[in-house]
Image (tube, rainbow, N blue to C red):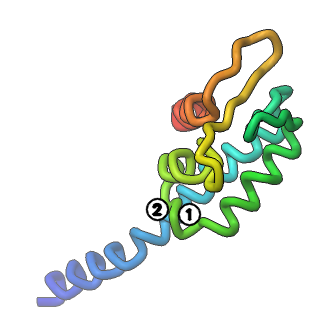
Amino acid sequence: MIKHTFNLVTLTVLFLLGPVAWADDAAEEIDFLLSAIGTSDCVFIRNGSRHNAKEAEEHLRMKYRRGKRYAPTAEMFIERLASQSSMSKKLYYIECGNEEKVPSGDWLSQRLQEYRH
């Protein structure tokens, strides 16, 4: 009986703490992505205007602060907050050095894959 009770308690605690750990992982990944933008030598193109890396990081951090509830995972952050303007619906782009500009969602997804491996 004691062993059964212990297993039930353990499962209950894991069930209750699981979402907290998951949220911590997502927040850590999102912070990594934001820092990756801010420390890059890339240009962030938003609504046709070019912004340096630090401005891009600041803008996306602001969007994340305001819209965190829409981005419980890093993938949702990329899809819902970091890929396009919420006002104009125009895609965001990132241009690094001599490379061709790419949609920010693609660039961020690549950084996320690298981070996870």
> Could you tell me how many numbered marks the image carries?
2
Disc 1 crowd, CA 10 A, few/some/many (<14, 14-19, 20+): some
Seen as rendered, the residue at the extreme front is 88
* Residue 10 higher or lower than 53, as above or below: below
Q: Which mark is residue 22?
A: 2
In the picture, measured across the screen, residue 3 lies left or right of residue 38, that is left
Image x and y of residue 21, in percent: 48, 65
Which residue lies at the image location 35% right of the left edge and 73% below the top edge?
Answer: 14
In the picture, measured across the screen, residue 79 lies left or right of residue 90, that is left
In the picture, measured across the screen, residue 41 lies left or right of residue 76, that is right
Instruction: Name the residue nearer the viewer: 19 or 69.
Output: 69
Which residue lies at the image location 72% right of the left edge and 52% below the top edge?
Answer: 60
* Residue 101 higher or lower than 47, as above or below: above
Q: Quadrant of residue 49?
A: top right
CB of mark 2 within 8 Å of CB of mark 1? yes
Q: CA distance from mark 2 to mark 1?
A: 5 Å
Disc 2 crowd, CA 10 A, few/some/many (<14, 14-19, 20+): few
Which residue lies at the image location 26% right of the left edge and 76% below the top edge?
Answer: 11
Which residue lies at the image location 69% right of the left edge and 52% below the top edge?
Answer: 31
In the picture, measured across the screen, residue 4 lies left or right of residue 63, that is left
Image x and y of residue 18, in percent: 39, 69
* Residue 106 higher or lower than 23, as above or below: above
Image x and y of residue 94, in percent: 72, 29
Q: Which mark is residue 24?
A: 1
Q: Give the residue type at disc 1.
A: Asp
Q: Give the residue type at disc 2.
A: Trp
Locate the N terminus and report the quarter of the image it occupies: bottom left
Q: Which mark is residue 6?
A: none
Q: Secondary structure at mark 2?
A: helix
* Residue 2 higher or lower than 7, as above or below: below
